[in-house]
Image (cartoon, coloured by chain):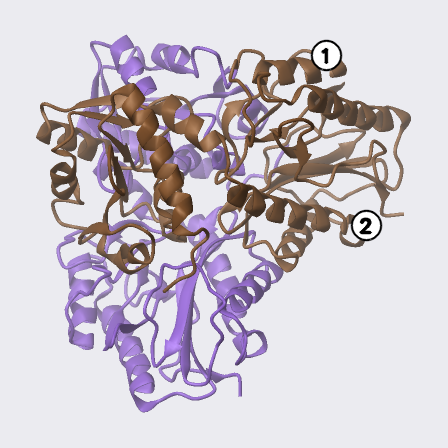
Chain colours: A brown, B purple
Amino acid sequence: MSEQDFPESEFAQRTERAQRAMHAHGIDALFFTTEAEVRYFSGFRTLFWQSPTRPWFLVVPARGKPIAVIPQIGAHLMADTWIDDVRTFSAPHPTDDGIGLLAEVLEPFSRIGMPMGRESSLRMPLADFHALTDQLPGTEFVNANDLVQRLRQVKSELEIDLLRDICQIGSRSFGRAAQLFYQGQTLKEAFRAFKIELLEQGADDVPYLVGGAGQGGYGDVISPPSDQLLAAGDVLMLDTGATKNGYFCDFDRNFAIGQASEPVRNAHRLLVDAVTAATAVARPGRTCADLFRAMAQTIGQGEGDVGRLGHGLGMQLTESPSITSFDQTELLENMVMTLEPSIDLGDGRMMVHEENIVIRNGEPEFLSQRSDPEIPVIGI
Amino acid sequence: MSEQDFPESEFAQRTERAQRAMHAHGIDALFFTTEAEVRYFSGFRTLFWQSPTRPWFLVVPARGKPIAVIPQIGAHLMADTWIDDVRTFSAPHPTDDGIGLLAEVLEPFSRIGMPMGRESSLRMPLADFHALTDQLPGTEFVNANDLVQRLRQVKSELEIDLLRDICQIGSRSFGRAAQLFYQGQTLKEAFRAFKIELLEQGADDVPYLVGGAGQGGYGDVISPPSDQLLAAGDVLMLDTGATKNGYFCDFDRNFAIGQASEPVRNAHRLLVDAVTAATAVARPGRTCADLFRAMAQTIGQGEGDVGRLGHGLGMQLTESPSITSFDQTELLENMVMTLEPSIDLGDGRMMVHEENIVIRNGEPEFLSQRSDPEIPVIGI
């Protein structure tokens, strides 16, 4: 018996919420192929998704528990979840990686919802998906993107507990920056030291760690770390998506190496001010666009390359909704969000700041330990 | 300018090989949505794929360099690769996450290949893919699975150098087992210690670490680690997919905690014998089914739950081909493979052993430092 991240009641509640929404949308079953959705409704957590060889399927019917259609290798682990109906196929299989079995499970349903829109992907071969729909000629497959995203956006208190835990691990790790980073260190070594610190502080994994460093700001926040040496006057930024029990933190911190110029200090203060401005409007009933406007007006610049100033957070590093000028998603109590304002500092340099919050009935709760307005100067 | 994993000539050669195969198959362009394929032809490496929000596209035309169609946030990093034609869209976008731009790029081609078969997935919203094909009514999209897999199966010497590097990091880390694992340690702590060791030995990341422990064998190799305590007589197995420069090792090691029973010793010897048997047939011209047979006959059991006894290895933890009874893929020089025999030890217990090799013209080259037939006893 492997350990479960949640009691059965958590999955029963998720499934009931889904089934109420399905009823309202006239959907008979939900069909999932992706890790986050399969885990959300089953509790099935494994790194085996790293291998592209085997597909994994979950079906949430209009009534009753979800049904798993999975490779034989996952049978033991799935049997430890709350799922009772686990159908397995031998995979890889010479001719049929579960499509026949899946068609049997889906056959009773006439209108099947699956995520087909923004942020979704199809984690099964397209040819197999076409074979499946060919075997179910009377079945309609419809886009259930909004339904599924809306469900997952609002977290339970148990989910928030896990998110608070990994955010605290992240905060404690950033708190050790002065012991970890120094002038003359390569970015690669700085990243390695920080990953090890996160693991030592209790993270299960560090699937995401990006950042950059440069004089008075950095130019790029999606490159892997290089052998560039940290120098006095650099601003070093690390942005981490570490996990514990399958839930992510996602926030960054900026550090001035040796010294901080006045423009750097001011930029950092302004970014923290932008988060404060967002905090004032982060209430149930307001929208993502409201959050965007609050931060953008504080910074006083356009949207820039990033195009969004935060997003949902949970089982994935980034989840819906996005904090953009055009996202009218209404904030609901217990949505977990990142606030991620950025400033263009000219000459191809920028600075980004990020915090993780829970929308509450009143002031939002910070999951990350809030950054001081003054940029920390380290490595002296 | 970020550091590149390969010189431009590597990508030119990959593209030329693809274009020769495309010509032979009457394919005008290849279209990719997945991390490994985009990186294979462009060199674009970033952890940003962790976020499901933004799609990334690459098109390999029949002549000339690939064309990237990507979110604006990746423009700097893509400009550092060998790709010249980088078209960007603002993402997330209120109405069009790059589909209009992509349709323009694909419009000149009448027969477009993309991976649609075994091991493939569609990393873009299905609704967007349908919108794309609707905008290209005269265009045929065909399954180019075999073509792309066959290209990627055969590694260049530069790729093999990277694979050797990460395999040596893995071997050095396993070599420290006696200092890392001990009786009374929780599996969680054992995993954490091993991840940190891999990072300290030079791994960039440890996206995959699974394993198990149990008296005389373990029951499950896909569960996350639990708080189970390591006890005398346990067999502990860790199976790691660590990465450096975007290339994976994938092998495991078994350790006896405190003492090893005769059945455990014999099982370990038999697994190493199975690898030796595979080594004798791992030659250009033989097949995956030949490798399967050599190992299965040595073990003397059926296929079991796993269904395969190894697979391709490279930019992904598992790649095609699979070492199964039915995979007739011909082995070619410079294919990198895992050999992964397993034994059913009864009472729900098993033992798995894995090594990483390169098919060479003659004896295969071991990338992992070969395991001794005697199971190491540690923690005394």
Q: Of A222 and A75, which appears nearest the observer?
A: A75
Residue B41, located in which quarter of the rendered image? Answer: top left
Q: Of B162 and B253, which appears nearest the observer?
A: B253
Q: Is residue B27 visible?
A: yes
Numbered disc in front, either 1 or 2 = 1
Name the residue tied to disc 1: A297
Mark 1 and mark 2: Cα distance apart in space: 33 Å
Q: What chain is tagged by disc 2?
A: A
Say few, some or many: other residues with alpha carbon within 10 Å of mark 2 (under 14 / 14 to 19 / 20 or more): some
Q: Is residue B297 left or right of residue B256?
A: left
Instruction: Tell me: residue A346, above or below residue B347.
Output: above
| Residue B331 in the image, given as x and y percentages of width and height | 22, 55
Q: Which disc, if any, is residue A2?
A: none
Name the residue tied to disc 2: A178
Report the residue at 42% width, 56% height from top: A4
Q: Amino acid at mark 2?
A: Ala
| Residue A49 in the image, given as x and y percentages of width and height | 36, 47
Report the residue at 57% width, 73% height from top: B180
Q: Is residue A176 left or right of residue A285?
A: right
Q: Amino acid at mark 1?
A: Gln
> Mark 2: which secondary structure?
helix
Say few, some or many: other residues with alpha carbon within 10 Å of mark 1 (under 14 / 14 to 19 / 20 or more): few
